[in-house]
Image: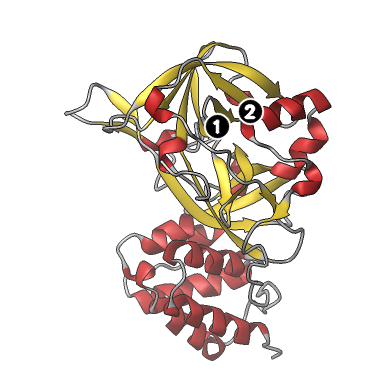
């Protein structure tokens, strides 16, 4: 476990929150002090009992009953107090909290929790269990401003077999990290946004919803600083997205698309067996439904890009999904360069 001065997501502090109640449920959380865990209020709503588990089925596994000492429906944040902590598990420092600017930038984030699609059934383990899920992606800062949440863009789960239950169920309460600081907490999956989007409550919005007494309890248990002491997350200058492609004509000549298509076909993630499928799953389903698919990668990419041109905004979604799936690389830089030049097309 990390000590004082070390920042960023620490897997040993990621909590699985097991809630008894009607119905029973589970969620995610993060240990923010020796005896406190941060999670979402709706995870522990109407709980009859709560147990928090760390490092499940690993050498360092431990768990403890917990009681809810703070719960705000308006902020969708809760603080759990562990009833007992092993002597060798003390010395936990609060994380750093920060805000992100309301600006036209793209920020990287990471989070770790226990979503429903990670259910496993292992012959060597007793029954079913839910594995951890470490997600990375980008924050769309200017989305969801009315709701007061951050829009997290990330790789979509490979399947959605239960139409009435989100595959992300159980991820609520996971701390969202940017630049070594907590900037929010996963709170919802809005089905209409697609499988590749989650919403996270912003840290700064907690101050608007919590009472002075609740903020003081939060300070003592979770190390939340006064609002005026919140800093900007490191790296929050981000990178500005390439010029938007939503305004391109739907009948753009193939020769104008050649550079972007060649750049996309060079991306290693798209050359794998299911890479393109993951990308299409995370953008508008109209593209997958109307693209003339082809087993030849170059022809397949041409068809998908041409289909995106018919639905404004989806080509930008496609490129963002590629960035998420591949991560920083020379190939992605080449894609961004081609997209920037294509954005300047004037016919």
* Most foreground residue, 182 or 152: 182
**Residue 106 drawn at (x, y percent):** 63, 64
**Crowding near the residue tagged with mark 2, few <14, some 14–19, many ≥20 C-alpha atoms within 10 Å:** many
| Quarter of the view holding residue 329 | bottom left
Residue 255 sits above or below residue 291 on the image: below
**Residue 70 drawn at (x, y percent):** 67, 21
Residue 131 sits above or below residue 284 on the image: above
Residues marked 1 and 2 touching at CB (< 8 Å): yes
Q: Is residue 275 left or right of residue 8?
A: left
Which callout, 1 or 2, points at the residue further toward the start of the chain?
1
Residue 34 sits above or below residue 305 on the image: above
**Residue 175 drawn at (x, y percent):** 56, 41
Q: Secondary structure at mark 2?
A: helix
Viewport quadrant of the N terminus: top left
* Residue under the image location 64 percent in, 44 percent down: 184
Distance of label 1 from label 2 (alpha carbons): 7 Å
* Residue under the image location 46 percent in, 16 percent down: 84
* Residue under the image location 50 percent in, 67 percent down: 323
* Residue under the image location 74 percent in, 36 percent down: 206
Viewport quadrant of the C terminus: bottom right
Please name the residue that numbered disc 2 is placed on: 221
**Residue 93 drawn at (x, y percent):** 54, 38
* Res 346 visible: yes
**Residue furthest top as drawn:** 48
* Most foreground residue, 318 or 115: 115
Q: Is residue 227 left or right of residue 302?
A: right
**Crowding near the residue tagged with mark 1, few <14, some 14–19, many ≥20 C-alpha atoms within 10 Å:** many
* Most foreground residue, 83 or 336: 83
Q: Is residue 98 left or right of residue 50?
A: right
How many numbered markers are drawn?
Answer: 2
Q: Secondary structure at mark 1?
A: strand
| Numbered mark located on residue 33 in the image | 1
């Amino acid at each position: 476990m990390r000590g004082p001065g070390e920042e960023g997501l620490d897997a040993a502090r990621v909590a699985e929150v097991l809630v008894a109640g009607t119905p029973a449920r589970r969620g995610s959380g993060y240990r923010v002090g020796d005896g406190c865990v941060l999670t979402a209020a709706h995870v522990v709503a109407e709980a009859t009992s709560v147990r928090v588990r760390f490092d499940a089925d690993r050498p360092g596994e431990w768990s403890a009953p917990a009681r809810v000492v703070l719960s705000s429906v308006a902020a969708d944040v809760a603080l759990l107090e562990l009833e007992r902590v092993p002597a060798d598990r003390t010395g936990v420092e609060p994380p750093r909290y920060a805000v992100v600017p309301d600006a036209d930038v793209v920020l990287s984030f990471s989070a770790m929790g226990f979503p429903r699609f990670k259910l496993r059934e292992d012959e060597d383990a007793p029954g079913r269990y839910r594995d951890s899920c470490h997600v990375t992606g980008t924050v769309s800062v200017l989305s969801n401003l009315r709701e007061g949440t951050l829009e997290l863009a990330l790789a979509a789960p490979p399947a959605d077999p239960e139409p009435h239950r989100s595959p992300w169920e159980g991820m609520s309460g996971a701390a969202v990290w940017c630049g070594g600081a907590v900037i929010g907490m996963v709170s919802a999956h809005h089905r209409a946004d697609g499988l590749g989007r989650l919403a996270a409550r912003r840290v700064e919005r907690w101050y608007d919803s919590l009472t002075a007494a609740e903020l003081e309890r939060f300070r003592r248990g979770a190390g939340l600083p006064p609002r005026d002491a919140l800093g900007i997350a490191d790296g929050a200058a981000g990178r500005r997205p390439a010029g938007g492609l939503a305004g391109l004509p739907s009948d753009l000549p193939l020769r104008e698309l050649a550079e972007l298509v060649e750049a996309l076909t060079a991306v290693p993630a798209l050359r794998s067996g299911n890479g393109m499928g993951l990308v299409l799953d995370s953008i508008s389903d109209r593209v997958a439904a109307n693209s003339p698919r082809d087993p030849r990668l170059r022809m397949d990419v041409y068809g998908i890009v041409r289909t995106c041109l018919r639905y404004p905004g989806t080509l930008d979604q496609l490129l963002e999904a590629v960035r998420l799936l591949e991560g920083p690389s020379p190939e992605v830089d080449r894609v961004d360069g081609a997209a920037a030049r294509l954005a300047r097309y004037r016919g």
